[in-house]
């Protein structure tokens, strides 16, 4: 059958006009979410706001996916692939942020609130123009929990109780089958550098695994008889030094980042520390590079314990896979971005050392994860803010909407071409086996 004749430029213009008409609502929604941040898997208010907004557009909404996820669907007029428009619900702890929650310290210092505005903007435009009747396939609007890999003790407790299995939102949704009927996933993430272009793309992101470490010594009176103790803090200090001394062994091209913190350093100043805890990520460009660096970190942790005669427990958590952006999707987005903001206001680079659970999706389906500007301050800092609502909220919604047209207009030739060219690194079942295989706890005893 010959492809349907479609004027994609005309369809995009209709959607852009619809988004412009709703710009005030889109920006207001983004500001409201920004002012009410919540931590991952506990984004009840945020999820409710998204669900109510989608219901207001006439969608049937499913809630409670991986505790707080929200999903709605729009069916096209003809059969075709399914596109997922993703927005992340969660914030992260940034105690000094002016909009930090006074109890949890959660703040939208990574701009996830903007993603939810994009999701709503695309949904509104598709409804207002009755665009589904001119598309093939289906669009799923999916608000996902817990992208930020934080609050690990609370999440680990939930995993022990069986409430969740994985500590990140997208891996948990993959486990639950929520992505089983989605063929292609798309979202736009904030870039928190004041000089960044309105729209941009990094083609590859790091992945990571996480370590939760406990050094176990022997308590003693620190003044009267420290020689009776085994100082777990000394073990941790030696281990941190040993990790730092590994840095010259990391290849530049592997983009390894190891950044430990001490989460518990002792119980009282006059007691030899017997329980000292660390957390760290081991980031890298490839799964193989991460595994190599993680083995070196484990050796350094064991060395610190051995040197002072302590025990060490190393709890390894799977973290996120490296993100490899789909080139076909990126090419569609690039063309739409340049049409919206001009070639001079578009940028692309080969790599970014940040990590995201969108990387997990990129292992099993074509993934689009470009960036938007309109922000000041660096991501994850108390200075992060959205200062240009049109650039942060409205323009990315237009770019996503236009990319939907490229993919699903006509007989969805664009999406079919993307899927034909895509070679998944893992099947969904293979991904779940791999991520489960990265999880485990080991104890080394030197007392």
Image (spheres, grey):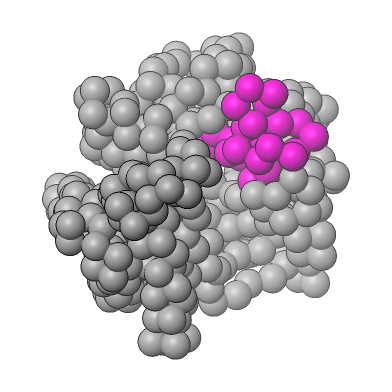
Q: Where is residue 34 in the image (x, y as percent from the top left)?
A: 71, 31
Q: What stretch is highlighted in magenta?
A: 86-114
The C terminus - image quarter: bottom left
Identify the residue at image location x=72%, y=67%.
346
Q: Does the magenta stretch include residue 102?
A: yes
Judged left or right of residue 62, residue 103 is right
Is the residue 281 above or below the residue 178 in the image?
below
Judged left or right of residue 76, residue 216 is left
Picture quadrant of residue 152: top left
Identify the residue at image location x=80%, y=72%.
344
Identify the residue at image location x=70%, y=49%.
381
Residue 175 visible in the current orientation: yes
Judged left or right of residue 447, residue 286 is right
Q: Position of residue 342 (x, y in %)?
A: 79, 65
Q: Which of the two residues, 106 or 325, is positioned nearer the viewer here? A: 106
**Residue lying furthest right:** 387
Judged left or right of residue 203, residue 388 is right
Q: Which of the two residues, 42 or 122, is positioned nearer the viewer here? A: 42
């Amino acid at each position: 059958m010959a492809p349907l004749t479609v004027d994609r430029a005309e369809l995009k213009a209709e959607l852009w006009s619809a988004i412009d008409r709703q710009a005030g609502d889109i920006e207001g929604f983004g500001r409201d979410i920004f002012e009410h941040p919540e931590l991952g898997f506990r984004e009840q208010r945020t999820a409710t706001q998204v669900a109510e907004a989608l219901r207001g557009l006439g969608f049937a909404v499913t809630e409670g996916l991986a505790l707080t996820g929200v999903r709605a669907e729009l069916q096209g007029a003809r059969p075709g692939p399914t596109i997922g428009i993703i927005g992340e619900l969660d914030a992260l702890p940034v105690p000094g942020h002016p909009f930090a929650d006074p109890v949890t310290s959660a703040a939208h210092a990574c701009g996830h609130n903007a993603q939810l505005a994009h999701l709503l903007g695309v949904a509104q435009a598709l409804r207002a123009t009755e665009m589904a009747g001119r598309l093939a396939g289906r669009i799923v609007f999916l608000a996902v929990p817990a992208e930020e890999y934080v609050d690990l003790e609370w999440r680990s407790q939930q995993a022990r109780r069986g409430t969740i299995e994985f500590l990140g939102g997208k891996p948990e949704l993959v486990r639950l089958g929520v992505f089983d009927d989605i063929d292609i996933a798309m979202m736009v993430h904030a870039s928190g550098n004041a000089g960044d272009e309105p729209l941009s793309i990094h083609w590859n992101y790091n992945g990571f695994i996480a370590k939760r470490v406990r050094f176990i010594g022997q308590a003693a009176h620190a003044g009267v008889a420290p020689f009776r103790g085994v100082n777990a803090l000394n073990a941790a200090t030696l281990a941190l030094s040993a990790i730092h001394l590994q840095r010259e062994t990391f290849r530049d091209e592997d983009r390894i980042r190891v950044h430990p913190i001490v989460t518990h350093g002792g119980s009282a100043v006059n007691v030899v520390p017997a329980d000292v805890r660390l957390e760290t990520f081991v980031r890298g460009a490839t799964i193989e590079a991460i595994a190599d660096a993680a083995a070196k970190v484990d050796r350094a942790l064991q060395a610190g314990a051995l040197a002072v005669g302590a025990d060490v427990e190393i709890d390894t958590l799977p973290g996120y896979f490296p993100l490899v952006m789909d080139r076909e999707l990126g090419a569609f987005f690039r063309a739409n971005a340049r049409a919206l903001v001009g070639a001079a206001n578009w940028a692309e680079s080969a790599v970014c050392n940040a990590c995201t659970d969108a990387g997990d999706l990129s292992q099993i389906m074509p993934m689009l994860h470009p960036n938007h500007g309109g922000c000041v301050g660096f991501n994850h800092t108390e200075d992060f803010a959205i200062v240009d609502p049109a650039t942060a909220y409205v323009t990315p919604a237009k770019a996503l909407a236009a990319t939907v047209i490229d993919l699903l207009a006509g007989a969805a030739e664009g999406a079919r071409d993307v899927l034909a060219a895509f070679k998944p690194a893992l099947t969904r079942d293979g991904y779940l086996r791999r991520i489960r295989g990265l999880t485990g706890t080991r104890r080394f005893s030197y007392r």
